[in-house]
Amino acid sequence: MSFFNIAAQNYRNPKAYINDFGKSELFVKEALMEYSKSIIESSPDDRIQTTMERIYIKLEDINNNLLKNDTGINGDTTLRDEFIKLNSKTILLLKNKALKLNDYIVQSNSDYEDIFKNFSYKEKEITVYYSDILYYEKFKKEFGLKYNILIRNYTSKNVFEYNAYQNLIFYKLNVLDDKLVTLFTLKDTEKVNECIIHMDNILKESEFKTREFKGEFDDESLNNITTELIYFFQNQNVYLKELYYKYIEEYLTFQEAKKNVTENDDEKTIAEYNEKVRKFNKSKNDFFDSLYENQIAKRDLINRWYKTNSLFLKNNIVFEDIYDNFIKQKDK
């Protein structure tokens, strides 16, 4: 497919020039869709990296073709220049992995300071990037008006931005949840409590944001499944924390009883020890059985989230809006 397949020329027909931009924008839209799908389908890192490299190489080719072949409308190349500038920012975000939102396990091994720095960095980059997109859309509209052409353009949050913020909520929760599940295998209530406090703060923030997202799209399936995930984590943290604390309490009591029976092996001490062993084993089994069942339920919910996310993009990204109707017809 050729994305800006024109010989170097000076367009005198503004409609023809702008329609060629529609073809270039179509490819950029398809490229973002391709990348989003690779994340949504939970593809292996090497496949995602290959996808990213293929995308930004093609985006660089578009920029090079535009610089070589596009001489604008009577020398006016301002639309071309703004498009290249935005394209370059997309390439940079792909290269520096600011849009990477699937490295949960790697990030969960970091300390909290680095985890939250990473969250802030990604959120800032996403916010700035989509602000740049809106600026470009405004510039495109003004460029068209200068040549008496109405160009279709976004005036509010587009589907990729909406999807990016939903993915960011999912990402933050999964990073902290991976950390929490690892801590549950240790016997350190202070670290577990610290993680749950951090996670609860993100859950409150996420709950607020999903309420804000309501009504932004007629299709609320993605927002609904993200809300369901938030409630799942909230309930999980309360339920498992209670069982975990009981398990640790019985473990400490058992350790004390073991010490006593070593020092004094009379019949009463042995009987107390056996009772402590029974209680400890019960609390341990209750906790780890519940943790196992919770992980299975969580996996099923996360798989539903992936499918919903994929369908949301499929159902709400309309490529022909730009390609076939890039230029709006004026009202008669």
Image (tube, grey):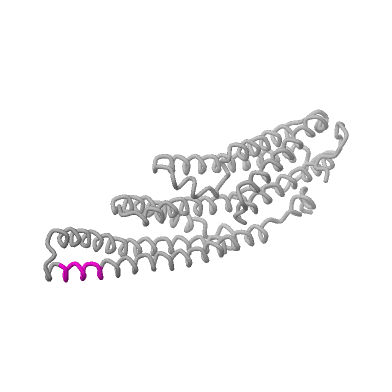
Quarter of the image where the C terminus is located: bottom right
- Comparing 223 with 250, the one in front is 250
Q: Is residue 85 above or below residue 163?
A: above
Q: How many marks?
A: 0
Does 65 sit above or below residue 229? above
Magenta stretch, overall SS: helix
Q: Quarter-wise, where is residue 311 in the image?
A: bottom right
- Where in the figure is residue 159, as x and y percent of width and height? 62, 53
Q: Is residue 228 left or right of residue 15?
A: left
Q: Which residues are magenta?
A: 270-279
Q: Where on the picture, by quarter, is residue 114?
A: top left
Which residue is at 76% across, 43% downward? Answer: 24
The residue located at (16%, 62%) in the rendering is 261
Image x and y of residue 299, in percent: 51, 63
Foreground residue, 37 or 5?
A: 37
Name the outermost residue toward the top: 75
Side of 8 relative to 120 (left or right): right
- Give the residue at x 34% y 52%: 197
Residue at horizontal 57 percent and vertical 45 percent from the top = 100
The quarter holding residue 271 reads: bottom left
Expressed as whole percent of the image width and height from the top left, the position of residue 62 reads 76, 37
Q: Nearer the viewer, residue 251 or 203?
A: 251
